[in-house]
Image (spheres, grey):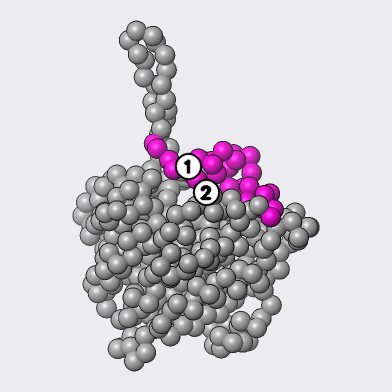
Amino acid sequence: MDPSTATTEQMQNECEPESSSIWSWWPSWRPTSMSLLKTTESKILACIQNELWARFVTLPNQDRIWTLTLTKKAQPAPKTPLVMVHGFGGGVGLWIRNMDTLSRSRPVYAFDLLGFGRSSRPPFPSDAAKAEEQFVDSIEQWRQSVGLENMILLGHSLGGYLAASYAIQHPSRVSHLVLVDPWGFPEQPQAQTLETQDQGTEVFKRPPLPRWVKAIAAVVSLFNPLAVIRAAGPWGPGLVNRFRPDFKRKFEDLFEDDTMTQYIYHCNAQTPSGEVGFRAMAESLGWAKRPMLQRVHQLPPSMPLTMLYGARSWVDSSSGQSVVQIRSQSLTKVILIDDASHHVYADQPEEFNKVVENICNSVN
């Protein structure tokens, strides 16, 4: 059966992707499963008011991409759809504050990246370029399977990096590129050595990182970035609550309990796959082996590009200004959203939605 024509009920009744790795040999050790992820996500998606079609889209190689399509009842003439790509360790549920509003005037698609969320979790190569290629190829195969000719492509964090790479390789498919606090743009700076005049000691300056980033960075060089969550077994959900209490706060008006932190846990306690691909592409947690600033000039001059940053984010917005200089002859904008951290769309959803709606309104 073609998944693009299957009903939601039919697709939901399909078997969930099976996990097979060193992490699944003792199922009781980790209080997670694809079924629990599905249940938690269903609670989140129940908040959606517009028409929702949720299903797996099967790629030619039989990998499956978990996909949401939102449309408003009695929507006007079809417009270029908005496609939203989540960041590292995320999934479609994190867009819950945005999808209803953004689908008022055009279809909105959101999908779990290959190797994340409820999508298939295949092996990824250890080579940075090949891992990136696997991600980008899966997005293009997804587009073909869904049948989209053009799209407004929006990516957050790792999703922004991959969206930029996709737009470089498939420019005719992207009407407007929107990058939200994108990861992997600048080159990793060399440690700056300062000599004090009187003691001659060395001081190394590094960009400030939040506690949860430092905690993951401590193990990323030895293990997959989220290995600590799986290794913690029954204490894994507690670790997510401890290091990411902000997720509960960002959505507390929607869920009084730990729904969102449970969602994050179940997304990332499964078989590591997408994070293996991320590790292959990352020099360290904050930097890419193949920085996007070195390639952004390959975007066609005619492609509009908007970069959104949280004013309080740990991602340096100066990369956006560098892109403006590189694309000086092209329509390129950088927008800072006040009182927003890395997860701009959840910190300031009304302002984020307004900015993105204005971008969408510039595209037929």
Q: Which residue is mark 2?
A: 243
List x then y, in percent, for residue 154.
Answer: 38, 65
Which label's residue is closer to the chain start, 2 or 1? 1
Mark 2, other Cα within 10 Å: few <14 / some 14–19 / many ≥20 = some
**Residue 172, placed above or below residue 310:** below
Q: Nearer the viewer, residue 93 or 186?
A: 93
Stretch in magenta:
207-234
Q: Quadrant of residue 76?
A: bottom left
Instruction: Report x, y in % for residue 304.
Output: 27, 63
| 169, 165: nearer the viewer | 165
Report if residue 133 is visible in the image.
Answer: no
For badge 1, the amino acid type reads: Arg
The residue located at (39%, 74%) in the rendering is 99
On-image quarter of the C terminus? bottom left
Q: Residue at x 36, y 85 (%)?
A: 72
Q: Residue furthest bottom?
A: 74
Q: Which amino acid type is marked by label 2?
A: Phe
